[in-house]
Amino acid sequence: MSLDLTKVAGQVTKMAAQLRYSNISKREIIDFALTTLRTADFGKLKRKVAASRTTWLVAGLVNSLLNTDPARPCPDEYTVLAADGSQIDVDRHRAARCYLLNIGTVMLHYGKYPAAELNSYPQLYSGDAEMVIYPEGEKNSKQLIEGSLLNIKRNVEECAALAELAADLPAGSRSLALLDGTLILWGLSGNAFPDFVVEALLEKGMLQHLDCIKALNGERQLSVASYISFPRGSDVVNALRVAVCPHDVVDTDKYCTKCASRECDKLAEVQDRDLFSNLLKPGERSSLFISTSSIVKNHYGPHLVYFFYLNAGEELARVELPEWAALDEELLNLTHSLVLDQCRKGQGYPVVLSESHEQAVVTGADRENFWQLVDMSLIEEHLPESGSVKSLSKRTRFI
């Protein structure tokens, strides 16, 4: 039976009315945030942020909060690379335990001799060697690659594909390697997974691929970045929460329950995009900021994640890049100009990311055909292919 929309229409109307009222009150809060940003003593705030201990993530400050930079012209010749991925997760109700990653890659060259290369690389993973992470040198502990961990594995493979693609760039070229989403493997933060999983996927995975991209800069100019559409972060706004706190050293665990004014609470509903959509003109980028997340500080080393906000015309986006690219003015300007150019060519979203997604996408029909192929292969090998009764019931019509 399909969803009966007539039963939820009234609820949707009520929700829309509540959102309209919320937007009116939110405008006042955004104005308060903008006033705080414009009047804050940057040097004092930078020191206060560095000394603060908060339960919310606060952006590390690099330069003036009010800096806005226009994009430089694109080079006459340049290349943009991207990698994106999709997956078919492990289905515990199926007879065969396996998963599939489909990584799409795109290389677009602009200039006197424009060219494009679009590819997809589906890879099936099965057996313990490919589906389980073990601590080095022992088999007593293990972590299955499925669910949220498979999402992280896909992110790592996207970066690996991007590094491999970048290795073929000619000497003297100017290029940008672009990923969709964040450079931060948030799923590995905290105690979500054991240390040996973080080591396998981050230190010996993602960061090694970023090392390879960085090393390519010896003979070519190559930046790497990630593009976050419609970002929901509040790192910079949280720095403003630190600014309005009456205490010289902010300690949320120590002071917040005893604080009577709670001026910072006014900013809790504001997101960074609310702030910078009022500050940046089309094409401009914000100041640089640093992610202070624990996983970045503890593991990323020379790839410490910096970010800026970009008014791409159709939307306000967050662009993340490693420290070595962020602090190189030429690479930073190249990232800004090429991301913006890609957004303009893609009607608001980087065209190279759109195309890599198209190469990688796995549809519902693709999933069903994949599992049918698996079942047929098991039959040919005289292996049981029925899976669980629950799986069979979902594929059978009774009424």
Image: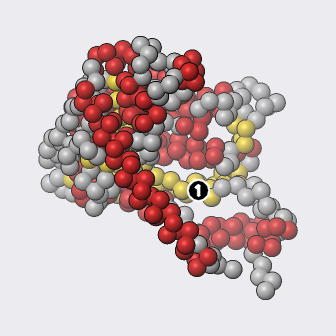
Label 1, residues with CA under 10 Å away: few <14, some 14-19, many ≥20: many
Closer to the camera, 272 or 198? 272
Left of 330 or right of it: where is 289?
Answer: right
Write the residue at 38% across / 47% down. Answer: 26
State the residue position of label 1: 87
Outermost residue toward the front?
260
Closer to the camera, 340 or 28? 28
Above or below residue 194? Residue 397 is below
For the C terminus, the quadrant is: bottom right
Amino acid type of the residue tagged 1 in the rendering: Gln
Which image quarter: residue 396? bottom right
Closer to the camera, 336 or 374? 336
Left of 351 or right of it: where is 137?
Answer: right
Q: What kind of element bears circle 1?
A: strand
Write the residue at 58% across / 43% down. Answer: 152
Write the residue at 46% across / 22% down. Answer: 301
- Residue 264 is situated, as x and y percent measured from the top left of the image, at 44, 30
- Residue 195 is situated, as x and y percent measured from the top left of the image, at 66, 27
For the N terminus, the quadrant is: bottom right
Write the residue at 59% across / 32% down. Answer: 189
